[in-house]
Image (cartoon, rainbow, N blue to C red):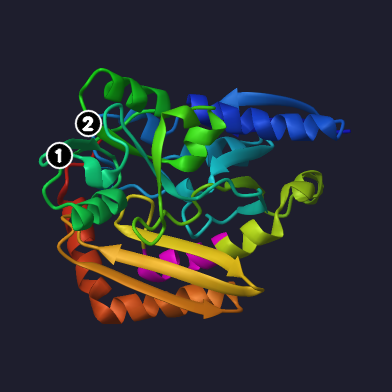
Amino acid sequence: MARLRIGSRGSQLALWQANHIANLLRERGHEVEIGIIKTTGDKITEVALAQVGTKGMFTKEIEEALAAGSVDLAVHSLKDLPTEVPPGFEIAAITKRENPRDVFVSKKYSRIDELPERARVGTSSLRRQAQLKALRADLEVHPLRGNVDTRLRKLESGEYDAIILAAAGVTRLGLTAMVKQVIPAQMMCPAAGQGALGIEIRKGDVGNRKHVGFLDDSSARITTTCERALLNQLGGGCQVPIGAFAEIRKECLHLEAVVARPDGSQVLRESRDGNDPQELGHEVGKTLLRRGGDAILQEVYGQAAAAPQQP
C-alpha cells in the first residue's frame, strides 16, 4: 500500500477533516501522515473575508505544496475551493456530505425570531449577513472571524447574543449541544459546497486518484457540481452574498439559489428542477443575473476591490 501525505490547514476543524480522511485511508492499508500548511486566510484574521478579495485564500499555499510534491493530496472544505480549479490540479473525490445548512447558536435565545431588537449577531459571511438582515433588519450584524472554537468562545464571553455557523463544522467537532436552531435552506440558503470535503490531487496523478476514488460520493458530487456551476456563472467565491443549495428529489435535481445585497434590502431567490447539474447551475445563475443579480454583484465586487489589500 502507498505512503500518503495530506496537506491541511491547522485549524481544529481542518485537522478533524484531514484526520477523518487519513483514518479512512489507513483502513485501506495506507500509511498516512498530515502536514499543516498556513494559508493566506489563516494569516489574515482581523479583516472581513469580503475585504480580503483573494480567491483561493484558504487553498493557494496548500496547492503550492501539492505542486512541489511535498504533499500527495489536500483535504479542503469544498466551499473554500474556487469554482475553477487551477491548472495542474483536480478534485479526485467529493465526500459524503454532512448537513449543508447553517445553524443558530446562542446562550440565551432559541431561535432567530426570539432575538430582541438590536441584538448583536456574529458572522464573517456576507451571504449570512444579507439573509439575516432580510429576516430581521433591526439586528446588528458584526464581523466574526476565527476558528469554530474561537467563535464559540466569543459567544460565551458575551461579545455576541448569537452567532451563525455551518452545521457541518459544529457536527464534526461534536458541538451540536450548543445549536439552538438548524436554519431551513429556504430561510438562509447555504454556501455552495457547504458540508462536503474536496480531495485535491495533482492533475493526471492516476495512482492517487485510484487511492482516494472510494471516497467519492455520487450524490455529493452531483449536488455540489450544480451549486458550483451556479457560483461559477455568477463569478463568485466564498466571500460574496451568493447561496446555493441543490438536492436530489425523486431522481430529479432541485436547486435553490440566492443573490442578495449585503444589507438585506434586496434578496433575489430562484429555484428550478433539472437533470444535468452543470446546465441547471448555469441556467439558474443566468436567470439571477438577468433579474438584477448582475448589478448587486458588481456593487459588491467593487466594494471588495476598493478595500485595502492585506499583506
Residue 256: quarter of image: bottom left
Disc 2 vs disc 1: Cβ atoms closer than 8 Å?
yes
In the picture provided, is 188 more to the left or to the right than 19? left
The disc at residue 104 is none
Hey, what amino acid is under mark 2? Asp
The disc at residue 161 is 2
Residue at left 61%, top 42%? 67
Q: Residues within 10 Å of mark 2 (few under 14, many from 20)?
A: many
Hey, what amino acid is under mark 1? Pro
In terms of depth relative to the viewer, which is nearer, 2 or 214? Answer: 214
Residue at left 35%, top 55%? 188
The disc at residue 116 is 1
**In the rendered image, which quarter contains the C terminus?**
top left
- Residue 128 visible in the current orientation: yes
Q: Is residue 77 magenta?
A: no
Residue 129 drawn at (x, y percent): 24, 49
Segment colored magenta: 224-235
Per the picture, the main secondary structure of the magenta-coloured stretch is helix
In this view, 147 is above or below 249: above
Residue at left 57%, top 48%? 196
The secondary structure type at the circle numbered 2 is: loop
Q: CA distance from mark 2 to mark 1?
A: 9 Å
Residue at left 20%, top 72%? 295
Q: Residues within 10 Å of mark 1 (few under 14, many from 20)?
A: few
In this view, 20 is above or below 223: above
